[in-house]
Image (tube, coloured by chain):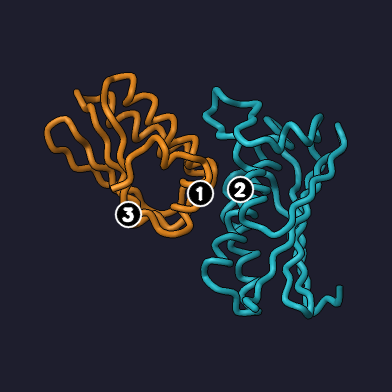
Amino acid sequence: MRLERNRNTVTVYLEGEMDHCSAQQIRRMLDQSIQESDIKNMVLDMREMSFMDSSGIGVILGRYKVLRSRGGKLTVRNMNRQVEKVFKLSGMDQIIDIE
Amino acid sequence: METVNSMKITFLSVPENESFARVAVSAFAVQLNPTLDILADIKTAVSEAVTNAIVHGYRDGQGMVEVEAALSRDGILYLTVSDEGCGICDIEQAMQPFFTTQPEKERSGMGFSVMQTFMDKVEVQSQKGKGTRVTMEKKLTVA
């Protein structure tokens, strides 16, 4: 996972697979990047994320709620077809911006 | 159904085996040359069923998860994921979108919805205290 910061926005480049096994570590790292500074907005770049199941929905929705409570927003970009299918099935595309 | 090939794997209910299970089933199914999208659907459904067995079936304990797959001559993958865990009290409720018994762990409650969307057929049998068996079907060849 690689991070890039620009003012109050952090872009997180996710890699590999997001399932129940990896979700906890990804959740911890995302929360750390939000809490360690005055980050308001987060962009999740999923170009290098090859797989996501419904455990990923929980991780993304959880971070969406955290950022929204701080007056910020979450954006997702570069999903592959499998990840996008899971994302849209959950209805997250109705509340989270896709770049 | 006329079976042309079948396989069965059994593994411990640890999260590291979620990716093992989906890769194993995907590798088995690939012999019928399904599209990448169909393979991705199967991997996702297997991941959900195995995660349910680990997270809900065995909860804080451990047990064995069994995955069986069979290919029929007419190009259908028959898949069964079963555990001998605590079972599901109310299957209908458990299959409702966003229903979860673990909201504090950010479980989305979308596992069965994903299985139903990504596979052609999903059936769940469960007995309290005896375990759960999820049976799924997916047509692998595009007509």
Task: Count residues near mark 2 (Cα–Cα under 10 Å), then give few for <14, some for 14-19, many for 20+.
Answer: many
Q: Position of residue B35 (x, y in %)?
A: 55, 73
Asked if residue B68 is positioned above or below residue A94 in the image, the reply reads: below
CA gap, disc 3 and disc 2:
21 Å
Q: Which residue is found at the position 68% from the left and 48% from the top?
A: B49
| The quadrant where residue B51 appears | top right
Q: Secondary structure at mark 2?
A: helix
**Circle 1: residue type:** Val
Tell me which label, 1 or 3, sits earlier in the chain.
Answer: 3
Q: Which residue is found at the position 54% from the left and 27% from the top?
A: B105
**Circle 2: residue type:** Val
- Residue A70 appears left or right of B16: left
For disc 3, the marked residue is A78
CA gap, disc 1 and disc 3:
14 Å
In the figure, the cyan chain has which letter?
B
For disc 1, the marked residue is A86
Residue B10 image label: none
For disc 2, the marked residue is B114
In the figure, the orange chain has which letter?
A
